[in-house]
Every structure is written in C-alpha cells, then in structure tokens.
Amino acid sequence: MQVLKFGGSSVADATAMSRVLDIVSKAAEKDKVVLVSSAISGATDLLIKASGSSEEERNALLEELKKKHFKIIERLFTGREQFDTKESIEQIHKRLLEARRDDYQAFGELFSTTILAKKLAYEGLDTLWIDSVDLIRCKMGSVDKEYSYKRIREVVESHPEIRVFVAPGFIAGDENAQICTLGRGGSDYSAALYAAALGANTLQIWTDVPGIMTTNPKEVKKAQTISRLSYQAAFCLASHGAKVLYAPTVAPAQEAGIDIQILNSLDPKQKGSVICDYPAREEGEWIGIAKRVCGDTAELALVADGKIAQQSIEDVRMRLNKRDISQLEFRDEGNYLLLKVPVSQALDALATLHYFCFEKDDYRKVYLAGKGAVGSALLKIIAESDANIDICAISAHECEDEAFFRKMMEEASPNSIFVDCTDSESIWKWYVPVLEAGINIVSSNRRALSVPYAEYAAMKRSARLSRRFLRYETTVGTALPVLFSIATSAASSDEILSIEAVVSCTLNFILTSELPFAQALKKAQEIGLTEKDPSQDLLGRDATRKLLILAREAGVKLEEKDIEIEPVEEDKVRSNQRFVASLVKDDSSALGYKASIRMKEIDETHPARSLKGTENMIIIRSTYQPSPLIIQGAGEGAMMAASRVLNDILR
Ligand code: ADP
Ligand code: ASP
Ligand code: MG
C-alpha cells in the first residue's frame, strides 16, 4: 500500500490536478494507493472568511468557490462526465449552505477529493472515495488511533477490488461523529494516519517545494534541499515553523517505522527529502533553520542532527554579534538552538545564520602559504585558468607566518580557502583554528597530515563541525586519485583488506635506473626528488608519512610507532625489488592491521614490475573488489601537483 498526499498548491487548478492524476496513475500501476488531498489552495482560508461573514457576503464567497471548482471541472471533463461531476459539486455546495458555520472549513477537502475521485474512476481505475469523518475519530481533542486504525483497515479490507482510495485530508469526526478538523495544515497528518493504519510501505507528501529545505526558500533564496533527516530533526523544524510539514505527522509514521518522503509535485523527478530513522550524532551538524513570529518577537530554531557542539554555539553567537543582532533569548536545547530576536531583525538574523551554516559562494578566495615549486606552479595555473579564484594573500614563508594567519582569520568569509603548499613541520598547528574560523583547507603538505593521530582527528573533527573541507589528495601519489578511492571504499563499507603503496619517487627512480645505486641517488638529489637530506628517504621517512595518510583514510588509527620499518641497505638492493609501504588486515593486531615499510622482492607477474622512473603505484584490495584496484601513474612534477591542488580547490 502506498499513501500519497497532495497539498493545496498541488491541486490548485486543472493543470496541477492533471499532474496529480499522472503521479497517482503511475503509482497505482505498482501497488494500491490511498490518495489524500487538501483543499485547492486558498479554499480553507476562503471558507473561514465566509463563516464569519454576513449572509450576503457569505453567499458571494461560496459562489466564488463553487465557480473555481466548476472551472477546473470544465477543463478536466467533457460531456456527461462534466455534467455529473458538476452535479456532485452542486450537492456539496448545497450541504455547505445548510451547514453550521463552524463546519464550513471542512468543505474544501470534500470539493477537491470529489473531483479527483471522479476523474480517476472515469479513467478506468477502480476508485473509491472514503469518508475521513467516519474513519478518523477524535476523542477529547486528539486522534483515537486505535479506533481510527481499525476502521481504516476494515474499510480498505472490505474492498479488495479497489486500486485507489481517495480520502479528504484535514477532516475527521469527533465523539459524536460530527465533522471536526485536525488543525491547519492537517492533511499531512491524515496521510500519516492512513499510512500507519495500513502499514503502508510508502508515504509521500507532495508539495510545491523540492523537499524540506535548510530554511523557507521564500525567505532565503539559497535554501537547499535536505536529502535525508531524522524524524526528530523533522519534528523539530516542523514544530518551530517549517510549514512544509505539519508537526503531528511525524509520530504516526515513526511509530509505524514508515519513511516520509517529501516531494515536489511541480517536478516529480527531483529526489526530495526522506525523513527516516537514523541515529542522532554525538556531535550534530546544522541541518536547518525554522522561523516563526509571535507578536513583535521572532523565534528562530537552528536545528542539528544530533547534540550541538559547544564550539558551534559559540560560532553562532559570534556571527550574530558581528551583525549587531539583539538576542532576546539564546538557549541551547540539546539538538537545537532557540533564538529570539526582534521581528525587525528576524530576516537579517535568518540570512546571517543561513549564510554561515549552509551557503558557499561560487567564487573562491585563496590564501596561499608556500611559494616553492608547487606554490609557484599553482599561481601560474590559476593565472592562466578561467576559474573564479581570487588570490587574497601569499605567504612565501616556509614555516608559519603569524601575521598572514591573523589577517586571513580576521577577514575570513565562508568561501575562503587556505592552501598549504609548504613542507613545514609545524604549520599544521594553524589548521584547527583556521577551520574553526570557517575557512576551508587544501594542503599538499604531507607533514601536516602525518602528525600524531589525535592531532589529525582534531583537524578532521573541526572540518566536520564547521562544515568546511580539508582536502589533501596530492599528499600521496600526487595527481593519482588514491585517497579518493580509499575514502570511497571506506565510506561504502567495502572493507580494505590491504594497501600496497610503491610511492617513493626517489627509490622508484633508483630501482628502475640503469645507474649504480650511489650515482642514481645523487642524480635523484640533483633533480629534486629526495628530501633535503637524502638519507631520510632511505630510512623511509617520506614513505612513513604517506602510509600514515593512506591508512587513516581507510579508517585505521595508525601511528608512526605502529609501522615496522626496514631501512634500505644500499648494498643489498636488487633491481627485482621495490620499496613498498603496506597495510594489511590482521586481526591479531590491536589496530586490526599491520603496517610495514621495506624492500620487497617482486616476481615477474607483480604489477609494480612495470613501473618506470618516478612512477607511483598503489594496489588496493577490498572485500567487494574481485580483483585489486591498481592505480599507477606519474608520481611527481610541480605542474601536475599544482593542477591537482587546483582540483581540490574547485571540486
Ligand atoms: P502544501 O499546501 O503542499 O501542504 P504548505 O504551504 O503547507 O504546502 O507548505 C509548503 C511551504 O512551506 C513552502 O511553499 C514553503 O514556503 C514553506 N516552508 C517553510 N519552511 C520550509 C522549509 N524548511 N522547507 C521547505 N519549505 C518550507
Ligand atoms: N486545507 C487545510 C489547510 O489549509 C489542510 C491542509 O492543507 O493540509 O490548512
Ligand atoms: Mg501543508
């Protein structure tokens, strides 16, 4: 069973209704459908107005409403079908004129669903209009679920031949079986009740926006669709003013374990949002902002998908202070922040928070540290490319330059990127404060990423919490998409079984050269392949850093002390060997993996046999890969590295 609910704007006129009929007919090909519909847009407001009007004005308003429905019928039906449908509407109109004024608002859904049910039936679908007043029963102001679910099931089960049940949303019956309503926006709730009663496998709420968005797109143009959110987050947004979903809708769906999809009836191909059961995070990320106005105060709820981190709260306060927004109240409610601001500042506060939490601009401001080979090549490529990049400041220093960082963090706008092309040992200490200032980082400095694990984890955490990126694809295998491939496996629960990395440009050069070892090493030093002190390469320093980065990307908390290193002994080196850094799954070790760096003999069939010059190779084996993923290609070159850095900046 599928339950599909359409809101007022999705049935606003004949064109909108045709779209609904299309969506429902397609769905009915797959499985039975309960179609729940709101009144056509504006109808409920008009009925409420009519209920408080003089007799004369009431008649005029109700006549206007009937005409609107007649107009739709004239577009959707012809001949006898048109006549019959108009007749049904005429009957409802007569009942309306005789109804108690308090009941007027319930009639909008009767009009709309009558038209939809008639049309589906005339199109040949086995259709039945069902009466929500009889099926959904309220007791002391809330829905009696036990009774209602039983009634809904009885009616549906007693009509096995029916393909599409059409039910008015919003309305229900009270203890005396008199008509009542579920509250404004209540059709969403009706749909969830039908879905829960029938154990539906699909519950779709079709509306006029692409889903639940980071905030109301009518107030902030750059609002983005939230693709997936928890019941809790959806409820929190809905109950604080995100009108797209009526808050009581969440409970019946959640109790029955049914996902709620929010879809756009104007563009049915869009993916929309899914509200489902997924665990709250220990440190939640911002997910959306809801706003509602109470008198001259506006209440903003900034909602996270888990517990809000202290740092994030401070950041929000700082942003509002910077814009001089008076915070009448500022409360941490665990998974959301509740702010009260004067109504006159509400839109400014909303825009400020939305910009800070969710927006990225389409041009990037770059602050570059390091003007060595890669940094200079990067400047050249940027100057030649038509990427929208604004170089705001350059620090030529090889190590940290306090004035440069202070300036960057002061002027930081959320789209800024700090690019580290240095090989500084200590510059990483700036990474966390830079991320926390809302600046992204692209780094080609592998020393910064091979720091002790706790420091590395702190950087990752800051990036996640401040919703900024930290990219460093060039730190292993330069332009080869190595880290990307490993992270993809790790993120899709394809467990890494082993990684063999032949990534030392110096040793690959020496081992594939015709020259004797000492001469080849000298040459490698001359052409700038080696560390400043070439003996460091033979001790595996560079390979160690690369292996740390690779392993951590695979989710292994590797530390330097965990790596078994056998330094290269010049006189024992053979050309059938390669200098291999490897990570191999090993359940007997505490980490779950063994890491080593050593010269390894490889036979004729080993892929690394084909390496030439400074080429790199990474061989990745994982559970779901039937044969290893082999990534091979050039391992060094300043222009190549720079172009990959640019890719990290732009992607
Ligand atoms: P329907 O008639 O389909 O029930 P509603 O008017 O009740 O539609 O709800 C959809 C409207 O909710 C949108 O047009 C939008 O202006 C408003 N809205 C408020 N907050 C949000 C949000 N966070 N995401 C999407 N829409 C929102
Ligand atoms: N028609 C009702 C209203 O306007 C219910 C709904 O649209 O969900 O509030
Ligand atoms: Mg609604």
Image: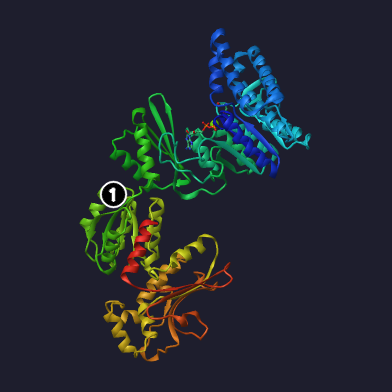
Which residue is farthest front? 79
* Tally of numbered tags: 1
Its colouring scheme is rainbow
Return the residue at label 1.
Answer: 412
Q: Is residue 71 above or below residue 586?
A: above
Q: Is residue 321 above or below residue 651?
A: above
Which residue is at the front of the view, 491 or 213? Answer: 213
Q: Position of residue 625 (x, y in %)?
A: 57, 69
* Quadrant in which the C terminus is drawn: bottom left
In the rendered structure, which amino acid carries the disc numbered 1? Answer: Ala
Which residue is at the front of the view, 11 or 251? Answer: 11
Q: Position of residue 452 (x, y in %)?
A: 37, 66
Q: Position of residue 352 (x, y in %)?
A: 35, 39
Report which quarter residue 471 is drawn in: bottom left
Q: Position of residue 610 (x, y in %)?
A: 46, 81
* Quadrant in which the N terminus is drawn: top right
Q: Is residue 403 left or right of residue 352?
A: left
Question: Does the image show residue 639?
Answer: yes
Q: Is residue 261 above or below residue 516?
A: above
| Residue depicted at 65% across the width and 25% down the height | 172
State whether label 1 is within 8 Å of ligand 1. Answer: no
| Residue depicted at 32% across the width and 79% down the height | 536
Which residue is at the front of the view, 302 or 489? Answer: 489
What element does badge 1 sit on? loop
Q: Is residue 276 left or right of residue 80?
A: left
Q: Is residue 313 left or right of residue 169?
A: left
Question: Does the image show residue 140?
Answer: no
Q: Is residue 490 left or right of residue 406?
A: right
